[in-house]
Amino acid sequence: SFFTLSTGDLSRSPEAPYQFLDVALDRTRLSVPAPTIELWDRRLELMHHYSLVTANTFSIRPEMQRVWRITIPEIGYSFPFVMQGILAVAAVHKAYLTPLERAAYLDLAISHQNAGLEWFRAGLHTINEDNWKRFFCFASLVVLYVASVPLCVHKQQPETEPEFLGSLCLCGGYGRSSNRTRRSSVARTWRPWPPLLRPSTPAVQLRV
């Protein structure tokens, strides 16, 4: 399983307040490979796929499709960890759509996800009214990533206990962090931003 949850794993996390992020980290691929020409080509391919295909699968509402397709990538251009999250989700989507290349795309997804999480974890405690959007965007991408990988690997909804518990742990951790944020001055700037996904929206998972 890509996402397993155990007390031992969580206790080893160096950042105890953010140990829920361990759920989305693949510890077999902690080292990020140096960029090569082939890797840059892959990144261009993934960004192209995200913009044309993946972003439009997250919502049926045009205004929310625009947020995923335009607004979040614009933030990603300035903040590498957000771009890593975008590329990770795009790679998972490509893995789902192209079974013959699934292993290669999953490797790319894991690499981008791990790289983004390192940046995200390091800065999560610094959230304020000036920088919250970048963290909110990446958190939303990570939730999509965690929910989508089991679907891609098993071609079914994640039903095994470790995957289910892992998703709950991740969402619960974000919930506690966002509760602290909403009690701060960040809340004044948070309200005008629409939710990226609504419970009533049928396109909560990657569609093909």
Image (spheres, rainbow, N blue to C red):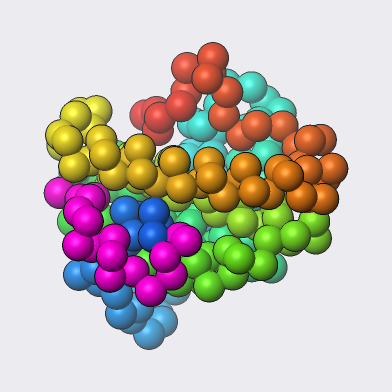
Q: Nearer the viewer, residue 51 or 31?
A: 31
Residue situated in front as seen by the camera: 73 or 43: 73
Q: Is residue 147 left or right of residue 68?
A: left
Residue at (52%, 20%) from the top-left corner?
A: 199
x, y percent for residue 137 = 60, 50
Position of residue 53 relative to residue 46, above or below, is above
Residue range in magenta is 1-18
Residue 3 lies, in percent from the top left, at 24, 50
Decide which of 10, 21 is in the foreground and name it: 10
Residue 73 part of the magenta segment: no
Residue 152 in view (yes/no): no
Residue drawn at the location 73% of the way across and 44% of the way down? 183
Q: Residue at x 34, y 60 (%)?
A: 22
Q: Classify the position of the C terminus by image quarter.
A: top left
Nearest the camera: 84 or 198? Answer: 198
Horizontal relation, residue 146 to residue 140: left or right = left
Residue under the point 29% across and 74% down: 30
Count numbered badges in the picture: 0
Q: Is residue 8 magenta?
A: yes
Q: Give percent across and percent down for residue 164.
A: 25, 35
Q: Is residue 207 visible?
A: yes
Residue 168 falls in which quadrant of the image? Answer: top left
Compared to residue 152, the image places residue 20 above or below, namely: below
